[in-house]
Amino acid sequence: MDFSSQASETLSDATPVAATPKAAPKSVAQGDGFELPPLWKKVLEGAGNFAETGVEFVSDVASEVVETTPEVVENLKERAGVVSDAASKTSTVFKAVTSPVGKNFLNDILFGSLGSTGGKEVFSQGGLDLMRQLVLDAGILEKGSVTIGKDVYKKLKSDININQTGGTSAGGIVKALAEGDPADEIKLILGQFSAEIDDNNDIIITDRFNYNSFINPLDGKEYNAEQYEAAIEQGNFTQLEVLMSIFSGEPNYKMVRAAGFVLGSKDYKDDARDEGREFKINLGPAS
């Protein structure tokens, strides 16, 4: 309800009455010699005259509050700083989640192989330009087709350290993804991939997003997809126990990758069983 509009309507519709002499405000220094602080005297005395001088009163009191209670100002500044810092962190997390890497990770967790084939729209222009440079450097114009292997992780420098035994902290990953380094798109979405020049003379990149292995925090051993399934079936551990162990560990790349393997798509030795989103990226004319 808008009380301010209701009040103005009530006042405007009221029958005019003869003005009555305004009563002098009572002394604010009343009772047993108790003396109110000057600021509160002004509040009470000003309230008596508020109908006539409301705007001036508010302005005057506000000025005196600032002058007489600087700690209030400092407190407000401190609170504003906390809110600003929280907003900044929220903005960073949002940028990371909505980055190409963030959206692809969530797509895999939620949809896996059910997700549509990914193309240019998944990546930033910087990521696409970097892909093109990689395949050109690998000699695709001369060879017609190339494979970008594990050396891509060393070749592409970024703030995210990909290491199954630790790696960059979760906070560091969020910060890096929010900043949008194209190298992270290649390393964390494609990794190793293939490219060829098709009949239309376009460079086509093909890949599948999935995980080939992870280090199980319960026993410290590395498992591929087949080994992990077998261990679950044999009752060595349950998936819930694995997940609880993953999320109780240090938040870093190792945790993110392990969670991605368990909850997301897996790469099997039998290609027919492979899970995960497929990519077909047309980088345009080879020359």
Image: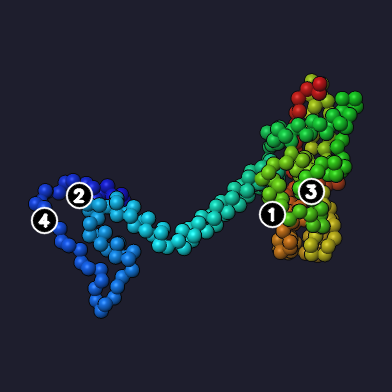
Q: Are marks 1 and 2 in contact (CB under 8 Å)?
A: no
Around disc 4, counting alpha carbons within 10 Å, would you say few (fewer than 14), some (14 to 19), or many (20 or more)?
few
Q: Quadrant of residue 43?
A: bottom left
Residue 229 visible at all: no
Residue 211's disc number: 3
Instruction: Check disc 4 and report the residue beneath it.
Output: 20
Which one is earlier in the sequence, the residue at label 4 or at label 2? 2
At label 2, counting other C-alpha atoms closer than 10 Å, the crowd grade (few under 14, some 14-19, many 20 or more) is few
Mark 3 and 2 residues: CB-CB less than 8 Å, in contact?
Answer: no
Q: Is residue 133 above or below residue 21?
A: above
What type is the residue that disc 2 sits on?
A: Thr
Q: Which residue is mark 1?
A: 171
* Residue under the point 71% across and 64% down: 248
Residue type at mark 1? Answer: Gly
Residue located beneath label 2 in the image: 10
Q: Position of residue 156 (x, y in %)?
A: 82, 41
1 or 2: tag closer to the N-terminus: 2
Identified at 69% across, 54% down, the residue is 171
Query: CA–CA distance between discs 3 and 1?
Result: 22 Å
Label 4, label 1: how many angstroms apart (C-alpha)? 68 Å
Left or right: residue 119 versus residue 86 is: right
Colour pattern of the rendering: rainbow
Q: Who is closer to the viewer here, 189 or 61?
A: 61
**Distance CA(mark 4)–CA(mark 2):** 20 Å
Q: Residue at x 25, y 62 (%)?
A: 45
Counting residues from the N terminus, which is met first, the one under dot 4 or under dot 3?
A: 4
